[in-house]
């Protein structure tokens, strides 16, 4: 097949409802048949675990700009008077040396202690969420909006000092923005326009918030970002806005998808659901890692080669765009035994790749895991009769995988339980 045919075939296969419902059979075939797939536009698609893990940590490759633009961030300059700042990029789209400076500032504001600092807040929010859900016992509810979304959204918005009446706007903007991470061929003109509108609106909102925190700082994340200083170089207004938006969206969106995807996987594998409900706290972190592997909320991670790379007999010149297919890597039988089975007791030698690798390892990985561990166990124990009550609806996205809705029946709730998993999760160092 020609390269143009490969591009058309790949795009067509990954745009179907069948792929959204279950991408893994197609990715398995691609991994077996052509693990290094070159498309007509020059992009290379990687599907084997070793190749995906390798490129994510390879310093000869970095982060590619998004397929959508950054007009929304750049537009802040016209609103807030940023002089000479041309579309500042969030840390996820920076490479050294700029990456180290910005990541250092973000680490001062949103460090590795975030799970511990937010634990009391998360515990309170979970208790409140479960109480509200219990009021609808015996009814059918949407697990995405009622069980997966409330806690991560409220926790991150609260830590930013964003009032509850603005949470709906954050969700609306985020849902439009995530299409910027998808390949251009999979995004319609209307979706692209909506994403750019969301960028502008979100950037304007965040710009006003940053300006207020500069005038009247507090102890929220935005105030800490404003105060952050790496080697005498604090973030300018454009960098503050771009990275605050990035932290806020990624501080809840992928966690919601992880929780909802995990609930669906568990409901479809009742023996594993029972195992997690009964699991001691020490076993919960590994169980969540397996849920991340089994149906990752991050399906693909973009990279671009900075220097030539040879890979399985293929020459990748500098400037080659790469789709590192995490979803395919996680189902590679050379890396994981019986990869299509959900086995919460799995203790693989290979790590999950959902949060990237190298110096771009996700800053919020610990918080996402911690929230998922707490919420999943709390929901399963409070609602022992939880069951599917309809067909799930998947979001029409490629790079990120998440549910738009998941109908479930809550059944009769058990009594409130004190405590939740408090095991100390291993710390993942960036790079």
Image (tube, rainbow, N blue to C red):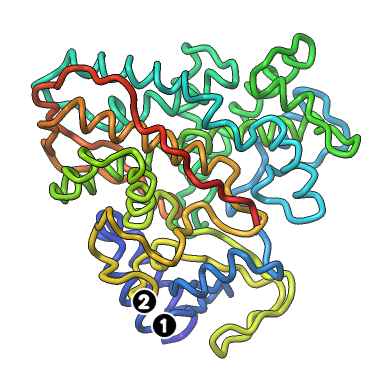
Residue 390 in which image quadrant:
top left
User: Which quarter of the rendering shows the C terminus?
Assistant: bottom right
Residue corresponding to mark 1: 34
Residue corresponding to mark 2: 30
**Residue nearest the observer in this picture, 280 or 122:** 280
Residue 241 circle label: none
**Residue nearest the observer in this picture, 155 or 66:** 155
Q: Identify the residue shown where x is 58% and y is 54%.
A: 67
Left or right: 216 as drawn, with respect to 181:
right
Q: Residues within 10 Å of mark 2 (few under 14, many from 20)?
A: some
- Would you place residue 366 above or below residue 164 in this image? below
Disc 1 to disc 2, how far (Cα)?
5 Å
- Image coordinates for residue 388, horizontal then vertical, percent: 13, 39
- Would you place residue 185 above or below residue 108 in this image? below
- Image coordinates for residue 409, horizontal then vertical, percent: 12, 30
Q: Identify the residue shown where x is 29% and y is 67%.
A: 339
Q: Secondary structure at mark 1?
A: loop
Q: Identify the residue shown where x is 51% and y is 52%.
A: 355
Q: Residues within 10 Å of mark 1 (few under 14, many from 20)?
A: some
Residue sticking out furthest to the top: 216
Q: Secondary structure at mark 2?
A: helix
- Image coordinates for residue 349, horizontal then vertical, percent: 43, 67
User: Which quarter of the rendering shows the N terminus?
Assistant: bottom left
Give yes or no for contact between labels 1 and 2 (Cβ–Cβ under 8 Å).
yes
Residue 63 in which image quadrant:
bottom right
- Image coordinates for residue 192, horizontal then vertical, percent: 52, 45
């Amino acid at each position: 097949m020609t390269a143009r045919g490969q591009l058309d075939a790949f795009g067509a296969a990954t745009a179907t409802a069948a792929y959204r419902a279950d991408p893994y059979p197609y990715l398995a075939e691609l991994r077996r048949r052509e693990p290094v797939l070159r498309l007509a536009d020059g992009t290379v698609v990687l599907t084997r675990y070793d190749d995906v893990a390798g490129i994510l940590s390879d310093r000869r490759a970095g982060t590619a700009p998004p397929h959508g633009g950054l007009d929304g961030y750049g537009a802040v300059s016209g609103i807030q008077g940023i002089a000479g700042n041309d579309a500042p990029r969030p840390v996820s789209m920076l490479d050294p040396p700029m990456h180290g400076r910005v990541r250092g500032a973000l680490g001062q504001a949103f460090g590795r202690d975030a799970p511990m600092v937010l634990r009391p807040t998360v515990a309170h929010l979970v208790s409140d969420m479960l109480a509200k859900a219990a009021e609808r016992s015996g009814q059918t509810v949407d697990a995405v909006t009622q069980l997966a979304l409330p806690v991560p959204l409220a926790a991150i918005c609260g830590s930013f000092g964003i009032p509850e009446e603005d949470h709906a706007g954050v969700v609306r903007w985020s849902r439009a923005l995530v299409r910027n991470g998808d390949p251009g061929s999979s995004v319609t003109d209307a979706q692209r326009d909506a994403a750019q509108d969301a960028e502008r609106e979100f950037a304007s909102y965040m710009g006003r918030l940053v300006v207020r925190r500069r005038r009247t700082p507090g102890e929220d994340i935005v105030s800490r970002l404003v105060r952050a200083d790496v080697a005498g170089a604090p973030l300018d207004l454009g960098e503050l806005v771009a990275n605050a938006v990035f932290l806020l969206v990624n501080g809840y969106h992928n966690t919601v998808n992880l929780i909802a995807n995990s609930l669906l996987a568990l409901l479809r594998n009742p023996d594993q659901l029972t195992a997690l409900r009964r699991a001691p706290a020490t076993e919960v972190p590994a169980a969540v890692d397996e849920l991340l592997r089994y149906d990752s909320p991050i399906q693909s991670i973009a990279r671009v080669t900075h220097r030539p790379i040879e890979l399985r007999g293929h020459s990748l010149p500098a400037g080659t765009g790469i789709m590192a297919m995490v979803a395919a890597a996680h189902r590679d039988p050379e890396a994981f035994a019986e990869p299509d089975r959900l086995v919460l007791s799995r203790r693989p030698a290979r790590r999950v790749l959902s949060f990237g690798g190298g110096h771009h390892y996700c800053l919020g990985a610990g918080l996402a895991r911690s929230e998922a561990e707490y919420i999943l166990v709390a929901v399963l124990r409070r609602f022992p009769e939880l069951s599917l009550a309809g067909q799930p609806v998947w979001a029409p996205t490629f790079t990120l995988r998440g549910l738009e809705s998941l109908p479930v029946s809550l059944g009769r709730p058990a009594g409130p339980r004190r405590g939740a998993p408090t095991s100390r999760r291993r710390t993942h160092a960036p790079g």
